Image (cartoon, grey):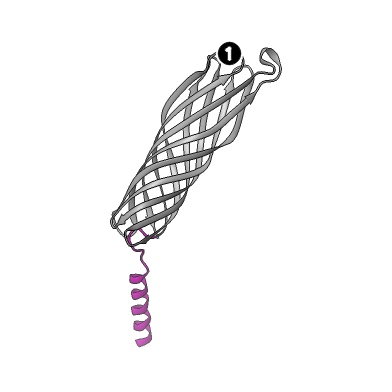
Amino acid sequence: MRIRILLTTALLAAAGTAHAAPLEGFGIGGGLASNSLDAETDFSGYPSSANGDDTGGSLFLKGDWMGRSGGFGYRFGLLLQGGNLSTSLFADDEFEVKRIATIDADLGYAAPPHFVFGVVELGSARVAHIDDNYGRTEESVGVAGLGVGYTYALTDHVELTAELLGRVLGQLEINYSGGALDGEHQTVDATVGSLLLGASYRF
């Protein structure tokens, strides 16, 4: 009986000390993103460029690790975000952003339960160009982004976060072969802005 009591006491003590401190440790979460797309294309066969834009919502997932040193907070994570964005450029073609995946660093002032931070991120985006006559070109392009954010720790484990991000996508190049556009060349440059609202659980 004494051994059983001692084991129970030890387990309860371990459970009481194993919880995460606010804004520290590994976390996983997700939420909603409000996105805006601005795209510009140049086509060697036309004398002028064309622009297109779109807005839309998507889901995102994020895993990260966070630490603190005094008032300095640092968080490093992996983000997978849906795009759900498309816009017409010229009359017969369309540009899509399907999804975005990034590695990001959040650096700023941490005073639990508050964390105010700046964001730097690098990664890739899956994009597509659809032409009514020449079909679909789909590939991954680079992404670089900057932003700001705020996290509030509801408990030692549960956090709410808002982030405002601006991203520049790498240039998509399309080379036409055959038909009336044989030998012509088109490029698409795009930026994506996102407002992310999410919740996470920190272990």
- Residue appearing at x 70%, y 20% in the figure: 177
Q: Residue at x 36, y 79 (%)?
A: 10
Percent coordinates x, y for residue 38 in the rendering: 45, 27
Badge 1 is on which residue? Answer: 46
Residue occupying the point 56% across, 31% down: 171
Residue type at tag 1: Tyr
- The crowd level at tag 1 (other Cα within 10 Å; few <14, some 14-19, many 20+) is few
Residue 104 is covered by the magenta coloring: no
Regarding mark 1 in the picture, which secondary structure is present there? loop
Per the rendered image, the range of residues in magenta is 1-24
Please name the residue shown 38% across and 81% down the image: 7
Residue 191 in the figure: left or right of residue 158: right
Residue 112: x %, y % from top left = 29, 58
Above or below, comparing residue 157 to residue 126 in the picture: below
Q: Position of residue 63 (x, y in %)?
A: 45, 52
Residue 30 placement (x, y as % from top left): 41, 46
